[in-house]
Amino acid sequence: MWLLNKTGVYASPFNQHSTTPELVAEFIDADTWIGWCRNMAFKVLMHEYQEFLPPSVKEVDLQRVISISSDVRLIVEAIQSFPDEFPKVPLNEETLCKWEDTPELDLYPSSDQYICDQLRQLWNLYQTDESRYTRIINRPLFNKFRELMAQNQHYYFLVRYPTQATLALTPLVSIYGENY
Amino acid sequence: MQLTFALPAIDFAMWLLVKSGRHVPPFDQHDPTPQIDIDSDLLDPENWTEWCRKIIFIETLMSFKSVFYPYHVSNMELIAKSAQNDAKVDLFIRILDSYPEHYPHQPFDIETIDDWTNFDSLNLPDGYYHLNQHLGALWSRFESEHRVLMQNRDGERAWKIHHWYSSQLVYCHRVVPYVTRVKLELTPYVFMHGEVY
């Protein structure tokens, strides 16, 4: 989201920031940016899945844990809501390790060495800006987001944005932009 | 309410195996040169495994106790209802149910819970209580070496490994430091993991 803001690129509904670029990353466009976010969201969910469930979990164990824990149910349903090309539950060790070991910056769609190098440089730049970018300045808005998450009906990723805007990555996974 | 108990006895059992140079597959990757002489078959594979199994049973029973003791330990209906609403409770009920016949099973009574959780530090299996004094004398050496080991560890990695294993909801995964990554099944729902950290 920082990169989208800084490059002035729009990916609807994130189209309320300044279009004047503060930095240039010509490989960023709406579709690949959304694809990148979707890949990163999937990696996060893989990690969450592993927190609770073993690789190649038996169906009977999976169903029992899902019936007890709404957190696990949402994680599993969110994973299943990704497009067909993504792995499905139950996940085996090879799949989980592959996603765990792949850095976020390498998940950029159709990435090549040039893009990876560019992203790494931009990442360093972002880190100098990170504390300002993630500091909570509006506690009620942040709390509102937490209440939304607590409903365990939809998996949201919170990002800072000038206005409230929600981008669906899958029917159950969204990026929630808020000026929190 | 504390739902996960970790007794140091399991680390002691692991330390003793390594120091004695004895092997219990898959914990058979450490140096076989003995640094401690143990004149007992406690470290034979079957007995050492039973020792670890017993320690984890006591840990799990302490979790059970922390939720249901003293008034509800025999209330099967309430216990089943709790398990339906809390995945951690469901897990430790399944762990206890997975133990062999000679372990206590539900419904528990207060006396059984008291007997099993009023443990000594070593939690030796039946028939090995005579070793209490000899092994007890090694305990302080274990504690000081274990403390040094813990201090030398990569703290963040150790925390991540422990967090990962303790948050699991399908099986009980008990982690101990070891020279390589291995996994030993103690019951269908209890696994002991050696991890490098």
Image: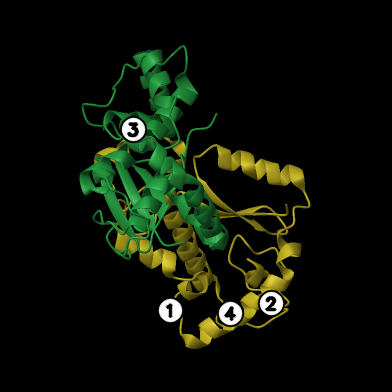
Residue matched to label 4: A120
Q: Amino acid at mark 3?
A: Tyr
> Which chain wears yellow?
A
- Are labels 3 and 2 on one chain? no
As rendered, which of B7 and B158 lies closer to the eye?
Answer: B7
Task: Name the kind of residue labelled 1 in the image.
Answer: Ser
Chain holding disc 3? B
Asked if one can make out residue A80 in the rendered structure from this viewpoint, the answer is: no
- Same subunit, labels 4 and 2: the answer reads yes
Give above or below for B99 relative to A112. Answer: above
Q: Is residue A94 above or below residue B78?
A: below
- Mark 2 falls within which chain? A
For marks 4 and 2 on the same chain, the one whose residue lies earlier in the sequence: 4
Tell me the residue that label 1 is attached to: A110
Which is in the foreground here, disc 1 or disc 2? Answer: 2
Q: Return the residue at label 3.
A: B129
